[in-house]
Structures are given as C-alpha cells and as structure tokens.
Amino acid sequence: MEEILKDFGLSDNETTVYLALLKIGNSTANRVAEITGLKRSTTYDNLNLLASKGIVSTIIKGSTHYYEPADPDKLLYLLDEKRSRIQQIIPKLKNLKESIKEKTGVTYFEGKKGVLTVLNDILDQNKELWFYGSRKKASSVLEHYPDDFILKREQHQIFLRAVLAEEDRGHPFYKSRSIARLSDLRFSKELNSISSNVFIYGDRVAFMSSGQNPVGIIIVNSEILEQQKKIFEILWKTAKK
C-alpha cells in the first residue's frame, strides 16, 4: 500500500503522515508526530504539503490547527485532474520533442547483400524517391535485382523522379503503364557508366557503388540531404526527356 502511494507521488514522510491520519482521524500536528515518530517540524511540513495537494484539509478550533485526511476516493479525482492537465500540455511537449536537433547517422554496408539492404531501406521508408545514376551499370553487379526493385516500388506505389544515364533510355520496364505513371524520367549522357548511384528519399540519402565489390552508405543528415536535392535539381534541368 505504501509503495502504491509513493507511485502516486507522495514522499515517504507524506505517506506515513497520511496513513496515520486515516487511522486516527482529525488530529493536531503534535498528535500525528507522536503516532509516526517524526519530528514535529517534519510532521507540520508534510501536513502542509498534503494540504496543498488536496489530500488533507485544515480546521482551526480556537488557536489550534486540526488536520483531517481526505476520503481516499479523492486520490482518484486527483489522478483524473493530473491526467487532464497533462493532456492539455501534450501538444507543447510534442513540439519540444520535434524541436530537438535531428538525429544524424551514417550506416555502411559492404558486398551485394549489403547494397540490397540499401534498396530495401528505400522500400521500407515508402517515401517519394529521387535518383540519379546508371541503372545499366548497377545491373552489371546486381544482376536481376534492379528489375525486382522496380516491381517492388510499383507494389509500394513509390513515385520516382530520376535522372538516368542515356544508356538506360528505352528500358522495357518503363514502358509499362503502371510503372510509367509512377515515374518521371529524364536522361543524361554524362551519367553513362557512372560508377555510383544516389538515392534521395525521406530524411536520408543513400550512395551505392557499382564496382565488383559494391558498397552502400545511408546518411541521415539534413545538410547533406539539402545539398543532394540541389545537385539533383541541377541535373534535372540539364537532362533530356
């Protein structure tokens, strides 16, 4: 019982004083001090704390203060009141949390399986995807997976804006109506055989190399994200439909 009252928010001494008052009823601070074994000053301070919390009331008879414990049901009302007050400030608390400086991080992956982890992260985030690079070059390393990724992107209904290498033009997958409606493509010969691809999605940027020992890097950082978006827009303006 004592532990539950402490969980409610009462200190050890407040709990001791409140339980004593429940047992003896209306009483003076001196009497409560005798029952609990606490110093009179300590007892008096804790009675006043309990009174400020609405758990104890004070009655003055002549020049003597008598303390009376509130009905235990009052604790439930106080909990409801606390809950109501907390609910009022929840929006402000959430705003404080959102104002905290973003979490940043870099995750590094090696090998084909590691690179596939990057592509799977794109699907998991399920955000609009911006891409620039060479799909053909990636296919030479990942074999059939780029095609699988296109199909999975369609299943997730992820929209793509991409500046592809000119050598990627005419790929049959992009002629499919269901995929074409989820894709806005432009092409640049400057990206032919480029050895790394860049994916911009959600709050992150991913880099994927297309060499014989591919690596993938996922970066969560707002400055790098904004930089890559600007680079993408520059490429987009100079690329051809």
Image (cartoon, rainbow, N blue to C red):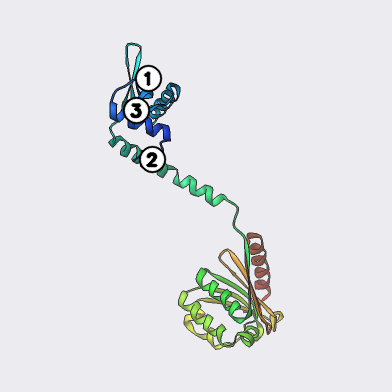
The residue labelled by disc 1 is 30
- 10 Å crowding of disc 3: few (<14), some (14-19), many (20+): many
The residue labelled by disc 2 is 8
Q: Position of residue 223 (x, y in %)?
A: 66, 60
Q: Position of residue 240 (x, y in %)?
A: 65, 78
Does the image show residue 54? no
| Three-letter amino acid code at the position of disc 1 | Asn
Which image quadrant for residue 233?
Answer: bottom right
Whether 59 is drawn above or below 239: the answer is above
Does the image show residue 119? yes
The residue labelled by disc 3 is 56
| Foreground residue among 220 and 228 | 220
Q: Residue 10 carries which label?
A: none
Q: What element carries label 1?
A: helix
| Three-letter amino acid code at the position of disc 2 | Phe
Whether 69 is drawn above or below 139: the answer is above
The residue located at (58%, 74%) in the rendering is 118
Q: Which of marks 2 and 1 is nearer the N terminus?
A: 2
Q: In the current view of this chain or complex, which residue is farthest to the top?
A: 62
| Foreground residue among 206 and 14 | 14
Q: How far is mark 2 from mark 1, CA to CA?
A: 26 Å
The residue located at (40%, 28%) in the rendering is 52
The residue located at (54%, 72%) in the rendering is 122
Locate the N terminus and report the quarter of the image it occupies: top left
The residue located at (31%, 37%) in the rendering is 77
Left or right, 208 with respect to 57, comes to right
